[in-house]
Amino acid sequence: MASQVRHELVLAYTNQRRAVSVTAMFDIKWIRANADAFDAAISRRKGSSASAADLLAIDDRRRDIITRLNEAQEQRNTLSKQIGQAKIQKDEAKATALMAEVAWLKDFISQGEADERIVEAELYAALSVIPNLVFDDVPDGADEAGNAEYFGRNGTAATAALQRTPKPSFAFAPKKHYEVGVAVREMDFEAAAKLSGSRFVALKGQVARLERGLGQFMLDLHTTEHGYLEVQPPLLVRDEALFGTNQLPKFEADLFFAPHGDSRLALIPTAEVPLTNMVRESILSEEELPLRMTALTPCFRSEAGSAGRDTRGMLRQHQFNKVEMVSITTPETSSDEHERMLTCAEAVLQKLGLHYRVMNLCTGDIGFGAKKTYDLEVWLPGQNIYREISSVSVCGDFQARRMDARFRSAGEKQAPRFVHTLNGSGTAVGRCLIAVLENYQQEDGSVLVPDVLQPYMGGLKSIGAN
RNA sequence: GGAGAGAUGGCAGAGUGGUCGAAUGCACCGCACUCGAAAUGCGGCAUGGGGGCAACUUCAUCGGGGGUUCAAAUCCCUCUCUCUCCGCCA
């Protein structure tokens, strides 16, 4: 490794406030004991060239340095204590002799500490960009074409499917959301562009109210029927929080940052960041779990690299509202919680009467930190496609390790274990607005208000009919 | 924005350079006493890393990082956070 690169690596490493030791971040002990399994698992992931052999080579060097350093420190500690004894006994001659004896260890130790720092920085850099390993039932695939429709745990789609709204049919050619009459008047892309550039929108009047009502409806649903605790989190967060939920170090380009003193704060790309990090650097008691939190927040995404995609309408914006659900669980319950969270997200679409399907994301499409992800894709008749409106992921202990979030079992005298984390949108409000506009549009350009939203619209049954 | 005070184990709270990883109290766990409980007594009770099959041993950690020293909870620098007062402000 070039020395300049190494220098910067060490600097970045030592200046960062790390929540967890380098070896705990991604279980290097597990890799050591299961090298083949690691290589097999990581090879399913696109975008990672990590290999157990490379990682363990760094770790072997690290352990070798530590062993030699520890021996020197032990010697120094022993001699230092003897010096202390001599001083207490006023035996200056003996103390001076001992100090001469220990002198050479000083350089040896500081060199060893420097070496340790370098090798830990290397290991840290290598481990921090390894994606989570996925579950066996995640389908293989190169891109979204490899995703598999999911019909429930037993493959029967039993209850959920029965409550799903069938794909609607129209007696006229349904318009895209930004062409629907009321939206044409009340989705002001031009004004927003003057203020902020492309990928922003100003909603007005009844459409603005509808968007607000949607967010309120979702939040109320999760807090009253699904047992989630409402949280209003900070919308600006530190780098450490972003590291915890794995936006950093790899996906910095997707974020907006605000300068702050000599540092910076990021605008949250999703409430997953603040909600999940609520438990960072803490040891929960098992009785507190599962901890379920939800929030309605704006989300900010730079969308670097997606130039030209979805430029029309408000499908892909730099700013949008989203209701997020986060669960903190024990390792034993996280998979059940994943299914549960999926039904919580589905409930939103079912109550709104929106047609959708559930996809089990394949290895080529799943996110960096997830072990398994279900996407809810809502039907957009104006565009004649299914579009992602919610993503529900189980992360295992991947984020917990990055945050140092653990729990202690009641009674049992064992060391604290890492919690498991899950996150899911329930749902993206902006995209849900699109779905309502397209699915409930009438030929005259007005839009019917879904029953469950009418209380949030002052009883209005339709908007834009004037 | 200005001035000052702080941050020690699950909690409270001692400790200002030398057997301090850290007194004491509370909480918690085990045992004894009890028909049972309370009270009492005895013992245990941090995290991470290295070595070892293990018993065990060793290193690091007193908010984070860096430094001085043979030796740092204790001295210096810096960052973060908390509190008090002043100013400003939704």
Image (tube, helix red, strand yellow):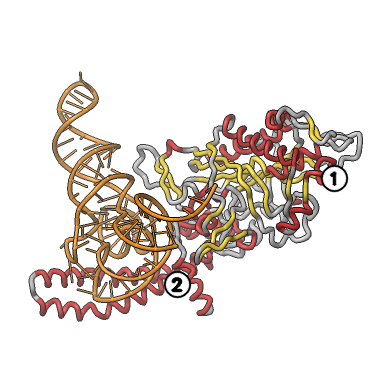
Chain under callout 1 = A
- Residue in view at x 80 percent, y 37 percent: A439
Res A166 seen here: no
Which element type, helix, strand or loop, lies under badge 2? helix
- Viewer-nearest residue: A220 or B48: A220
- Viewer-nearest residue: A368 or A61: A368
Q: Which residue is mark 1?
A: A179
- Viewer-nearest residue: A20 or A222: A222
Q: Quadrant of the C terminus of chain A?
A: top right
Residue A118 badge: 2
Mark 1 is surrounded, within 10 Å at the Cα level, by few (under 14), some (14 to 19) or many (20 or more) other residues, namely some
Real-space Cα separation, disc 1 to disc 2, in angstroms: 58 Å
Mark 2 is surrounded, within 10 Å at the Cα level, by few (under 14), some (14 to 19) or many (20 or more) other residues, namely many
Q: Does residue A68 appear left or right of residue A207 in this picture?
A: left
Residue A461 coordinates in the image, percent (x, y): 77, 28
Against A389, residue A128 (above or below) is below
Q: Earlier in the sequence, mark 1 or mark 2?
A: 2
- Residue in view at x 76 percent, y 40 percent: A435
Q: Quadrant of residue A462?
A: top right
Discs 1/2, front: 1
Residue A298 coordinates in the image, percent (x, y): 63, 48
Please state which amino acid type lies under the numbered disc 2.
Ile
Against B2, residue B12 (above or below) is above
